[in-house]
Amino acid sequence: MTCAILTIGTELTRGELQDSNGAWLADSLSSLGLEVTEIVSVDDHDGRIIETLHRLALTHDAILCTGGLGPTSDDRTTQCVARAMGVPLVRDEASLKLISDLFTNHGRTMTPGNEKQADFPQDAQIFANNHGTAPGFTCQLGHAQLFVMPGVPYEMRAMFKASVIEALPSPSEANICLRLRCFGIPEAEVNDRLSGVEDTFGIQLGYRASNSEIEIKVLARGRDPSLIEDRAERAALQIEERLGPAIYARGAGSLSLTLGEMLSERHLTLGLAESCTGGLASQLITETPGASGYFKGSICCYSNSIKSTVLGVPEEALQEHGAVSEIVARQMAEGAKSILAVDLALAITGVAGPGGGSEDKPVGLVHFAVAGPLETLTEQKIFRGTRVRIQRRAADHGLWLLRQAILS
Amino acid sequence: MTCAILTIGTELTRGELQDSNGAWLADSLSSLGLEVTEIVSVDDHDGRIIETLHRLALTHDAILCTGGLGPTSDDRTTQCVARAMGVPLVRDEASLKLISDLFTNHGRTMTPGNEKQADFPQDAQIFANNHGTAPGFTCQLGHAQLFVMPGVPYEMRAMFKASVIEALPSPSEANICLRLRCFGIPEAEVNDRLSGVEDTFGIQLGYRASNSEIEIKVLARGRDPSLIEDRAERAALQIEERLGPAIYARGAGSLSLTLGEMLSERHLTLGLAESCTGGLASQLITETPGASGYFKGSICCYSNSIKSTVLGVPEEALQEHGAVSEIVARQMAEGAKSILAVDLALAITGVAGPGGGSEDKPVGLVHFAVAGPLETLTEQKIFRGTRVRIQRRAADHGLWLLRQAILS
């Protein structure tokens, strides 16, 4: 049971748009226990689209295809599928009505190109699009089942969840996928520390790294659903044991979300004082809906004068120790706690680079402080990489320290 | 002269890592006047890698391949290329020395896997890797020229620029690519407003959209370099005329960078007061190196109490008009200008959602104010989409308003 993903569009092969559908679908299919062996993008060229469809149908059981369902002459997918199948296009009056209603409701005029979006290869099963004008469909191509979806990511994702998942061929075995969220250990080290886990528990591990976080997927397959659930659970416990406190949550989510839940549960309010991260830590926290329940605000004190005038860091401390120092981080956190009137305040001050580093205080050096109800914790770290990477690692680490402070 | 891009790795076909190399290479090759017709990712499976290499070599003049050059047993690319070519692997002593020196310099121990990284298909031309242990190479495969590079993006990009560009087959004609940066017009509208430009000037247009910005590429090809330069320049002038002030810069860059240049040139200092964007506008400004030269800081006043206590917004104004109102935006901007002691202050206050909207003040409503040396400008906008998208559009628009205020 192998799958291929085909994303269609000259904007992809010219590099004008980075294909995010391929990776999203690959992750979703893997989590369902299906194996993807190829992700291919081709341009809006009939010959190449048809050739690729034929080639993939020879070697795969399912083909998931996105893009090229729009109203313009560049949108070739439906016609190419019909030609590859050797069947005519047939207009679907029900889809036509849905599309025309969508235009009426938005007070816009339908173009002849939009009518074309109600044409489908004969005998295709149609998938409604609840977020746009392009319906999707599924049909048989050779021995493969083909699924065709729009290219706009949120339309595609909604259609995949609403219609495609249930129409997908079942994997040959039952399967389960547990997710564990891990912070602050590089992927190569996670891989090392989990060596042997796959064989011991008869499961497969997958990693999805993004900035300082890694999502660890535990995938178990087999005939007996309760047996594989048990295997996956025992493997997850083993992973939690081996990686210790770096595993901070199960399931989908983010550190920002987990932190928000912890603050809400404990009725704690939060404020920040950011220097080198320039507002990024605050932005990460406010990405989570409902952040206003616990997050009061932040002082981004990029210049030393604001560290003094707004946060009350004594000018002598700045002169004697410099803005990037443990003592200034501590004073920033305590100043923010007081001026923002919060229970917990995080301060971050460092050298993001590329300029401004010295032998004493190299690019990447960051001081952190968390002022809490009883005491102020401090820490220093050195991060490597570009300016943007150092800022992101520092902001992530700041959120992690807040979690540590709450748990301590 | 067509190119294919092959990215290798099970982490890609499982969706654990989104392939960014494909789009980056496609954009780079397009800008050099080369046509990419396929981008394909395959898993770490010898049979499929070799089959894909053979298939692409039949239909393309150049194949650019990334990934699978690491030290572990999963890294199959070099062996597969040698098998596809039907030649043995040959160890390159000079590369071995460079790799082993790298380990010595970092005080780490070299593994047998790393020795393998000094093996290349017979007669391959080797490319040094200045940022990692995996050298790249180029060789002939059938009638196609194959370029093999590491998968780590910054290693790949550096190698592409340092070694691959000059070894690429020349496009059949000379070419030139101009880039124009456009803000705030949707891609479909840009496309409409530029209709006919391609035919009139004999050029090709490409678009690369990211958040509120679109990079417009003007690509001209032909035999006579001075003639195509003239065509591209005249097309660029026509585009600037048709899109007016939405075109804010030429070449690579970002609105944050352009804004920074404008502030530096005029010796103006900047501060912010952010509510619904939660620090994002501040983060976008401080992404640009050297931002400390003009950016003093920001008050992220997520809660109303901080709008009053730190920025001095009168409580009556908050009660009477609500935090999301023109008058509060104005008071936030003027308060930030005063407390941060800056020449210009931007304030952003709105409803990012998903909760908190009302009939009067729907999700997506955002009020902006820019307090300058002489006056305070205000504006309101309604943005659609998810919370994260509304926050991003609002922060981008805030930077745009700052640019307008400086120019006015």
Image: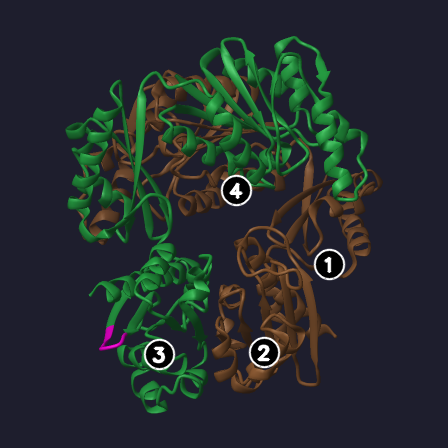
Chain colours: A green, B brown
Give the x, y percent position of residue A225.
26, 24
Q: Mark 3 points at which residue?
A: A337
Kindly check if marks 1 and 2 are in contact, taking CB atoms under 8 A apart as contact: no
| Chain to which the residue tagged by mark 4 belongs | B
Does A88 sit above or below residue A217?
above
Name the image quarter holding the N terminus of chain A: top left
Magenta range is A372-377
- Residue beneath the point at 34% across and 85% down: A318
- Is residue A375 found inside the magenta-colored segment of the image? yes
Identify residue for label 1: B246
Type of secondary structure dominating the magenta stretch: loop
Q: Can residue B342 be seen in this view?
A: no
Q: Is mark 3 on a helix, strand or loop?
A: helix
Select label 3 or label 4 by which is in front: 3
| Chain of the residue on which disc 3 is drawn | A
Q: How much space separates mark 2 and mark 4, taking CA atoms?
A: 50 Å
Query: To which residue does mark 4 refer?
Result: B24
Mark 4–mark 1 Cα distance, whole angstroms, equals: 25 Å
Residue ID at (18%, 50%)? A244
Residue B233, percent across and down?
A: 77, 51
Q: Distance between the residues labelled 3 and 4?
A: 44 Å
Which amino acid lies under the numbered mark 2 shown in the image of this protein?
Gln
Which amino acid is tagged 1? Ala
Crowding at dot 4, Cα within 10 Å, few <14 / some 14-19 / many 20+, comes out as some
Disc 3 crowd, CA 10 A, few/some/many (<14, 14-19, 20+): many
Mark 2 — residue? Answer: B319
**Which callout, 2 or 4, points to the residue nearer the camera?**
2
Check if mark 3 and mark 4 are on a common chain.
no
As shown in the figure, which amino acid type bears the numbered disc 3?
Lys
Asked if labels 1 and 3 touch by Cβ distance under 8 angstroms, the answer is: no
Q: Which chain carries label 1?
A: B
